[in-house]
Amino acid sequence: MLGQAFGSNRSTSLLSEYSNLLGDAILRHRAKIAEKSARVEAELANKLKSEFIANMSHELRTPLNTIIGFSRLIGEHEKRQLSKENISEYSGLIQEAAKHLLAIINDILEISKIQAGKFTLDLHDLHVDEVLGSSVAFFKVAAEDAGVTLIQDISHELPPIKGDPVKLKQIIMNLLSNAIKFTPEGGRVTLRAITDGHGQVRVSVRDSGVGMTEEEIMIAMLPFGQVDGGRSRMREGTGLGLPIAKALVELHGGSLGIKSVKGEGTEVTLLLPPASDVSIGHQSGIKQLARGAISPSV
């Protein structure tokens, strides 16, 4: 009996020791995985910051050079004997460059406010179809100039939502601008809005453009992240449109998702809750954006 008890105690001790060893091994393995993940994220963050600095230099210099160059020409109009048509054309170019520069600055200030948790919405009961319709109308000329067919398919039975009309329009215009920008001539961009089975408004912007891989989608959703991030990239932009749109949607209590196939196109879908489900001061967007934030001041 004593031998059996001693054997039993020894077996229990061995099992306990093996269990501790296994637990330690699992913890070390998880620590290695976490360390590797953190290292990869840090490397990606450093890469994005470097690309951001290079790209922002280009983004800021281009409109500034336009403003400085053409304002100098206008200032020397008597010596150069510029015509009224020349002065009008140069003034228009200066104005467009100034608007572009202001938009860049506004994006940076906006994302900084969101990251700092100081962003607030001016919520009202509104009909989202009006916001969608005006956004599509704004981009009709741009789509025609790009040779892209812009289609709207908006249900007439959308429920009212509680939202900030200015920020909702900013979200939709960001998505339409991206879709048109990355869709080649002869392609299509479709804005669709319906009510799902839970009373939410589902808005989607689908294009037949260049598309993205899963990795490229992850980069595109990071603040200042650009899929085409090199100095020789073909399309202008700061890489803030999608992250700001996602954060603003989540501040409304909704969600933003992306489906894309490389070479076939991209679909961005928004889910906006009905007016009764929105809580003022929703912080999800701030938290999500802050987790992937890269400070432009670094």
Image (cartoon, grey):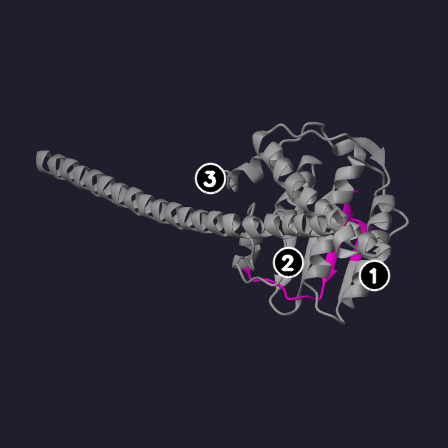
Question: How far apart, in angstroms, are the residues tagged by discs 2 and 3?
Answer: 31 Å
* SS at mark 1 in the image: strand
| In magenta segment, residue 212 | yes
Question: How far apart, in angstroms, are the residues tagged by discs 3 and 1?
Answer: 41 Å
The residues colored magenta run 191-214
Give the residue at x 67% y 35%.
Answer: 251
Between discs 3 and 1, the one toward the N terminus: 1
Residue 149 visible in the picture: no
Q: Residue 39 location, x and y as percent?
A: 37, 48
Tell me: residue 180, above or below residue 46: below
| Type of amino acid at the residue the image marks with label 3 | Val
Label 1: few (<14), some or many (≥20) within 10 Å? some
Between discs 1 and 2, the one toward the N terminus: 1
Q: Quadrant of residue 140?
A: bottom right
Circle on res. 151: 1
Direction bottom: furthest residue: 186
* SS at mark 2 in the image: strand
| Type of amino acid at the residue the image marks with label 1 | Ile
| In magenta segment, residue 171 | no
Q: Quadrant of residue 26?
A: top left
